[in-house]
Every structure is written in C-alpha cells, then in structure tokens.
Amino acid sequence: MKQTPLMKKIEANMQPGVITLHGFLGGDERDLATIIDADNAVVRRLGLTHEQIAARMEELRNGGLKGLGEFIKIESAFEVKVDSVRGKLPCPFGHPGIFAKVNTTVRNLKLDRQITYTLLNSHLIGEHGFYEGKGSPFRLEPGDLIEILEIEGSE
C-alpha cells in the first residue's frame, strides 16, 4: 500500500491529542501504510482475514456482555469481561459512526494469557486492517490476538 495524501491526513488524525490523548501510533516511526502492510502480512501468513479476526472479537465481546462487568465463562476455554467507560470516539479513518468506549478482556484459560481490546479496535481491524502502531496503549499484535482468541486459519 502506498502512503497517499489521504493516508497522511488519516495519520495526522492519529497523532496524540487529536482524537485520543495518546493517539493511535505510539512511538512507531513507520508511516501508516507501512504499519498496515506489515500487520496484513502477518494475518495473511496465518491464513486469515481482518474481517474474521474482528468477527471473533465481536463474538466474544457479545458473549461477555451478559456478565455485566464481571468475568463470565464463554465456551470452555475463555473468561470474558466487558466494561463500559464514559465517552465515545470517532474512527480516525473518517468512517461514519461513533464508537462507545467499551473494553473487552478475554482470558484464555488453556494458555493462561489474556488480551484487552475496545469496540474501536475491532472496527479498525475489521474495516481498515489497522491494529495501531507499536507502543500505542491499545496496540494489538495480530499474532497474539489470533493465538489468544483461538482463531483458526489455513496456515
């Protein structure tokens, strides 16, 4: 993917203080197109799509909603907690819609690992293939996300 003028504008929206206090890029010095390309390569190598990953994130979040802020068991391998925080965020790509600040924490009991993601994370992944820049507080490493959420690909 090429770093177009539109991508530069989107990258400007992702800087600290524009939409969020810390921004979406962390200390990552790569441009937005390079960040997206690198994460896309990981996802493709594992035989998955960003849409499949986002769908699994949403599936677990929806299951966890029944816990009302407490961990509940989902399937046999997961505990999920969904917390809502005041406020909403727009998509830095300019996608329509405002996303409530909802955090989902998934514990994989078999792996003894957990991961936390937001509603905006699942949107950014499913619609834009964006996992945030390295060093961002809400950066999700695609390989970790796939492993912890047990998303099967066609490796």
Image (cartoon, grey):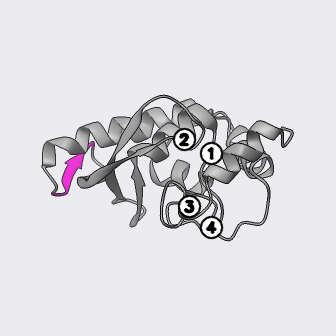
Answer yes or no: do the residues labelled 3 and 4 have beta carbons within 8 Å?
yes
Q: Residue 9, how many percent across, how many down?
A: 71, 44
| Real-space Cα separation, disc 3 to disc 1, in angstroms | 13 Å
Foreground disc of the pair 3, 4: 3
Q: Measure the C-alpha gap from mark 2 to mark 3.
A: 14 Å
* Residue drawn at the location 50% of the way across and 54% of the way down: 19
- Identify the residue shown where x is 65% and y is 65%: 134
- Residue at numbered disc 4: 26
Q: Is residue 3 above or below residue 143?
A: above
Labels 2, 3: front one: 3
Instruction: Give the residues drawn in magenta, as a range.
Output: 70-75
> Which labelled disc corresponds to residue 130?
1
Q: Earlier in the sequence, mark 1 or mark 2?
A: 2
Q: Are marks 4 and 2 in contact (CB under 8 Å)?
A: no
- Observer-nearest of 63 and 155: 63
Q: Residue under circle 3?
A: 23
